Image (tube, helix red, strand yellow):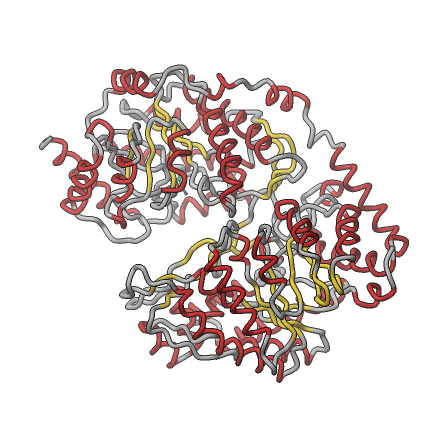
Amino acid sequence: MTTQSAAAAVRATVYGYPRQGANRELKKAIEGYWRGRTTAAELHRTASDLRRNSWRSLADAGIDEVPTGDFSYYDHVLDTSVMVGAIPERHRAAVAADPLDGYFAMARGTQDVAPLEMTKWFDTNYHYLVPELSPDTVFAPDPRKQVAELEEALALGHAARPVLVGPVTYLLLAKSAPGAAADFDPLTLLDRLLPVYAEILARLRAVGAKWVQLDEPALVQDRTPAELGAAERAYGHLGGLGDRPKLLVASYFDQLGDALTVLARTPVDGLALDFTERAATNLDTLAAAGGLPGKRLVAGVVNGRNIWTDDLERSLATLGTLLGLADRVDVSASCSLLHVPLDAAAEHDIEPQILRWLAFARQKTGEIATLAKGLAHGTDAISAELAANRADLASRAGSPMTHVRAVRARAAAVTPADARRSQPYAERAAAQRAHLGLPLLPTTTIGSFPQTTGLRTARADLRAGRTDVPEYEKRVEAEIREVVSFQEETGVDVLVHGEPERNDMVQYFAEQLTGYLATRHGWVQSYGTRYVRPPILVGDVSRPEPMTTRWTRFAQSLTDRPVKGMLTGPVTMLAWSFVRDDQPLGETARQVALALRDEVNDLEAAGTSVIQVDEPALRETLPLRAADRPAYLAWATEAFRLTTGGVRPDTQVHTHMCYAEFGDILAAIDALDADVISLEAARSHMQVARELASAGYPRAAGPGVYDIHSPRVPGTDEVAGLLHEGLAALPPERLWVNPDCGLKTRGWPEVRASLENLVDAARAVRSAL
Ligand code: GLN
Ligand code: ZN
């Protein structure tokens, strides 16, 4: 099926690999260094051992060109800021005194200096440190890290390709430094940045880089002609340099669209494109543009951000089509493998049959190597792998776990009426006023109270068998008693039980729903040394037993004030898990919504009059391309309404989201038809309230008046001031008083003081109305 020249050329490669090591050695070493228990030399040694192991395991799996520079002590965008000398003024002295400590100061801040801002890397759960640039930024090349890691890989005998964040994406991800004009556009610095990249490329070439990869994932988002023009200028310039390695420009997470044609006509030597389902149009765009004659194409056919075994035959078919479109086709994952756990083989608790459906980073590299072999030498060369793969896919498709008749029948029978409350908001609001008898400006919290060491120890003891279930439950009840009596004494109007039984807002529910799997070692980097272990949504979802009613009912038995029931919403249950790829997301969301609906209805039946369904992920899973957003928002909001649509008009539905910028999903927030929404607002001086008001949002809202991201206790006057700002936008009948988010990461003393002030402020403002 292949020509001789293709056979000679096909290579297997990846753009990046999990950094932490099989036992999270990197996390331990870095945190040890922060605590003064590990020396810098020990940390560097651990890091270099980890890199060596990763390259070796890639090479052993058949990856013949390994990435370098993808490793990081904290974040690869921060590494890029260091590489181009974009050190904010406030961190200069620390970086000059000690580059490693200065680096960590930029990442985490110190007693005196604020860190860089952190935000999500596209639509993944990885967070990067936002470059801070201003018209005064002076770039200067400092590629010591990138050079050293390349030298290290070359010395070990690997064919290696440095991977850098490209200049256009770097600038598009940056923000104005504090003090710079608000309308300053970092992209205007491109002409200053390009010579720095040119010098870095020359240095990498001097130590032996044949190819360098420049990642430009920002080009898969909707881009203006000016931004596309910047990309064309950047790669026209870098491609035109005399002394340079070959350049591979990589994109991932979506289709390139117009940017593909733009990049294809620049004098770079290759493009790496995502060919997974969400970027499917890349194939047509590439064909329509006449392919990449004379260039190298790296085909990201193996999905780099899910954990499912690849359909090798389908990927081979895609690769076969691509062979006709470029000078040379290599095989890769669609993006860095940073976003998946390291090794499925470490999961001893998952049934062997199901384990074969899963591919983590190690398994994916095997798939990539197999595909490269098949592409080069024909399918006969990989017939055993193909047969095994067919069997695994068939076992997954035919498994009773992935197709539960009752679940499917129920989802298919959903009618629009199921996703609609029985009365419109205005009528419900009146019924709820009568039923709940709350004052104006009612006070509440977002759900969790401090997760103390005692609680965590109790959970660990339960897991390890040192405590039995009754003992553990007594411990949880004691905590709930304390949380409830504190709220009663303080005078909070709508109480919570404090969520002491929850390890994590997604995992807690995933453990109790059918269709979810948990991993033991499936860690994925969220930011810095923080790793999460997302559950795997593998099959059809249902709720065999009530999940939260026991605790909410217990809390309600302790007080006459209403206790709010607390659930994680369907979109967030998907967003913070690895979800199945064998059916549309909307269908999976509908199953989860129906399972949660059972819980909502049971809470109501158990006497709960206020029920909160958290959807902090609603905005973060918004598709990268605007054209894909309406379809997403349609199923996402339907799932929320299906979760909450079955309750009586006088039962009050709350939702919560943890961000202050939601302008682009305002209509969707309205479509949730929740009675009350709480949002983050304390830092933005209630901007949220003004935005809701100017959009004509008709329902009640609680813009946060207590910033829970800091241990600082807000004063009563400060909270009252924020409430007045809220009242300038929203009428008193529709304004709630609450913190920005849950309190689980805070300590009791500051929480006590802050909530006392919050209640005092609400009382003062209320009595003056
Ligand atoms: N109810 C959750 C809590 O209070 C909400 C957390 C969140 O919004 N991320 O912890
Ligand atoms: Zn929140």
Instruction: In this rendered view, identify the residue nearer to me: 586 or 19.
Output: 586
* Residue 42 visible in the current orientation: yes
Q: What residue is shown at x 52% (from left), y 68% (from top)? A: 233
List x then y, in percent, for residue 657: 38, 40
Q: Residue furthest bottom?
A: 206
State whether residue 714 is above or below residue 95.
Answer: above
Image quarter (top left, top right, bottom left or bottom right) of the N terminus: bottom right
Q: What residue is shown at x 51% (from left), y 59% (from top)? A: 228
List x then y, in percent, for residue 573: 51, 37
* Label tally: 0
Q: Residue furthest right?
A: 380
Q: Is residue 726 left or right of residue 208?
A: left
State whether residue 588 is above or below residue 248.
Answer: above
Instruction: In this rendered view, identify the residue nearer to me: 585 or 714.
Output: 585
Instruction: In this rendered view, identify the residue nearer to me: 590 or 26.
Output: 590
Looking at the rendering, the quadrant in which ligand 1 lies is: top left
Res. 274 image quadrant = bottom right
Instruction: In this rendered view, identify the residue nearer to me: 201 or 383.
Output: 201
Q: Is residue 590 left or right of residue 297?
A: left
List x then y, in percent, for residue 279: 62, 48
Q: Is residue 664 left or right of residue 252?
A: left
Image quarter (top left, top right, bottom left or bottom right) of the C terminus: top left
Res. 381 image quadrant = bottom right
Q: Is residue 310 left or right of residue 18?
A: right
List x then y, in percent, for residue 261: 61, 58
Q: Residue furthest left?
A: 768
* Residue 75 visible in the current orientation: no
